[in-house]
Image (spheres, helix red, strand yellow):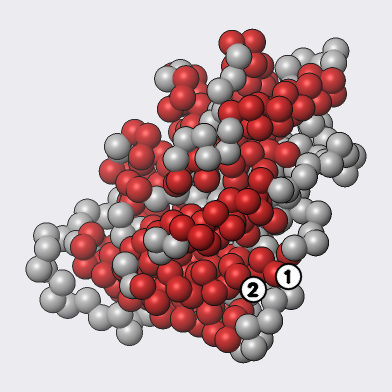
Amino acid sequence: MADRFFPNDMPEFVAEAPLGDTSSSSSSERTEISFTKLLSLPYRTLSDTLKKSAVDLKETVVRETWGLSGKRIQDYTVYTGALGTAFLAFKAYQVTKHPGDLKLCLDIVKACDSTSRDSSRVTFLCGRAGVCALGAVAAKHAGDERLLEHYLKQFKEIKLSNDLPNELLYGRIGFLWASSFLNNHIGINTISHTRMRSVVDEIIKAGKQLAKKGRCPLMYEWHGKKYWGAAHGLAGIMHVLMDMELKPDEVEDVKGTLRYMIKNRFPSGNYPSSEGSESDRLVHWCHGAPGVALTLVKAAEVFGDKDFLQAAKDAGEVVWRRGLLKRVGICHGISGNTYVFLALYRLTGNEEYLYRAKAFTCFLHDRAQILISEGRMHGGDRPYSLFEGVGGMAYLFLDMIEPSKARFPGYEL
Ligand SMILES: [Zn+2]
């Protein structure tokens, strides 16, 4: 088990020095002392450092995933493909207001638009909805009404087949997330309540059908397994359902499903990756405590329930102890796990969670590149992608500039 993550020997808390007191820090020293100094920097100084690093990383990601390929798209998705680079460029634009980043985002989306025209994938993270939704939002920011209409029209033409799964990466809930993203950024009813409701109906119906006679009110399957995590299972489906207008009995089903998960978590506090699994191994966003933690934070926000708040904090402890993974990415790496502390900070206002987010981020900033080059950390199967590679690390660094506004990309609204 221990080889999946680095033992977390970082200090429980390091106080920040007052602004202006940065005299003796030397970023070239790769020692414990320099790491502690990084943690003790005044927040504004640290965020300037992270911003610079994020911009450099973004340039590398753009070169590797867009420039060097001659702007030809092989994988168009947000998850591992070019659209992830577009999403990172959009984030950079939101932080820096540099018009070149918005233009870059729109150029990449345009290329993805033509590549994905015949794709039957419908979600934000891995499908056509991501292309159309990000295209529409970026077009709105660029003040291009015609382009906005184009992408919205394309989005509305997406057809959901009857045999679609319900999970986030390839299924119905991933389409609903894209709809909420549009309504959030462009205006309520951009995607109509009726359209979204018909998808919610199918998801609830499928969940009740599979849950029949079980102890959990809703249950889903993907490739024959009843997954619990954010990417393919209950945590992801419940997370997005909480953004929908649900009927009172549906609200109870969502709460009941979350209570079932809390009751049946591992003694360690971690969550099984699928129903009945006894393997307490993965502490990822996709499988395990981090993805569940984000859903529980949302449940605490939406329902104001103390049990969900406590369970979210408990899951956060697991992420602190076992979440310093030997990968950098958003899906199953340190960057994704850091968003758990940012979500808990947003929910509770407790500075200790901001410190934990900072500690994971500083670990990445200080050590990731070296550990990867030494072969002690995995660079990711798609090393420059948003969800598996350094694209996600750049996104996190940009989010750390204004931590109370940070949102897990493509997942938290
Ligand atoms: Zn993953």
Q: Residue at x 73, y 48 (%)?
A: 158
Quarter of the image where one finds residue 214: top right
Q: Secondary structure at mark 2?
A: helix
- Nearest to the observer: residue 30 or residue 259: 259
Q: Residue at x 63, y 51 (%)?
A: 153
The span from disc 1 to disc 2 (Cα, nearest Å) is 6 Å
Q: Residue at x 54, y 31 (%)?
A: 243
Are the residues flagged by discs 1 and 2 in contact, CB closer than 8 Å? yes
- x%, y% of residue 109? 59, 67
Q: Say whether residue 25 is left or right of residue 11.
A: left
- x%, y% of residue 225? 85, 39
Residue type at tag 2: Ala
Q: Say whether residue 287 is left or right of residue 19.
A: right
Residue type at tag 1: Thr
- Nearest to the observer: residue 125 or residue 312: 125
Q: Which mark is residue 115?
A: 1
Relative to residue 138, is residue 309 depicted above or below?
Answer: above
- x%, y% of residue 288? 65, 43
Q: Secondary structure at mark 1?
A: helix
- x%, y% of residue 152? 58, 51
Residue where numbered disc 2 is placed: 111
